[in-house]
Image: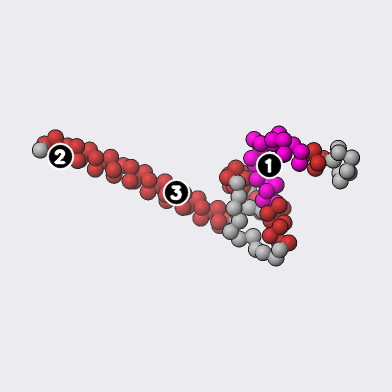
Amino acid sequence: MLQDDGNSLWLKFAQGVVNGVFAKQDVLLGMVEALVKKTERLAKGKSLKNMSYLSAFSDFCNVLASTSTRAYKTFKRQFGGRGIRSMQYVFFCLCFALSLILYLEIFGQKRLAFRQAFLRET
C-alpha cells in the first residue's frame, strides 16, 4: 500500500485531490481534513476543542449521530468531529435563531400592515 512506484493508492488519491477529481466529495474531503487536523493537534499536545469542520462533514456527522450515537462515537474516535452535546447546542442555537427570525418577520409584517392602514386613514 505504501509502494513508491507511482501506483500507490494514497498517491493516486493525493493526485486526484490536486487535480480536482474529488472536488464534489465534500464529506470525504472534510473527513480527511478532520483526521489531519486531529492528528496534528494531538501531536502538538493540544486539545481537540474549538476545532472547525467543513459544513458537509458536520452535516454527515449530525445525520450519523442522529441515526446511532454509538456508531457516531466510534466514527468520532477515528476521524474527529463535534461532541454530541456540542451538536445539540449548535442545533439549539440554530432553532432559536430561526424562531427569532420568523418572529421578527411576522411581527414586522403586522407592524407594516398597521402602519399602512394608519396612513390610509390620515
Q: Are marks 3 and 1 in contact (CB under 8 Å)?
A: no
Query: Where does the magenta region start and end?
Result: 14-35
Mark 2 Cα-neighbour bin, 10 Å: few <14, some 14–19, many ≥20 = few
The outermost residue toward the front is: 18
Please name the amino acid that badge 2 sits on: Phe
Instruction: Name the residue nearer the viewer: 68 or 20.
Output: 20
Please tell me whether mark 3 sits on a helix, a strand or a loop. Answer: helix
Position in image of residue 11 (x %, y %): 81, 41
Disc 3 residue crowd, few under 14, some 14–19, many 20+, Cα 10 Å:
few
Local crowd at mark 1 within 10 Å, few (<14), some, or many (≥20)?
A: some
Q: Give the mark nearest the N terminus, 3 or 1.
A: 1
- Look at the image and tell me whether residue 67 can be seen: no
Badge 1 is on which residue? 28
State whether the magenta stretch is mostly helix, strand or loop. Answer: helix
Of marks 3 and 2, the one in the foreground: 2
Q: Where is residue 110 in the image (x, y as percent from the top left)?
A: 25, 41
Marks 1/2: CA distance? 57 Å
Q: Residue 118 carries which label?
A: 2
Residue 27 part of the magenta-drawn span: yes
Between marks 3 and 2, how big is the CA–CA gap? 34 Å
At horizontal 88% and vertical 43% (from top left) the residue drawn is 4
Q: Which of marks 1 and 2 is nearer the N terminus?
A: 1
Tell me which residue sits at (65%, 63%) in the image: 47
- Describe residue 121's horizontal placement relative to residue 79 as left or right: left
Instruction: State which quadrant residue 23 falls in.
Output: top right
- The residue under the point 65% across, 42% down is 27
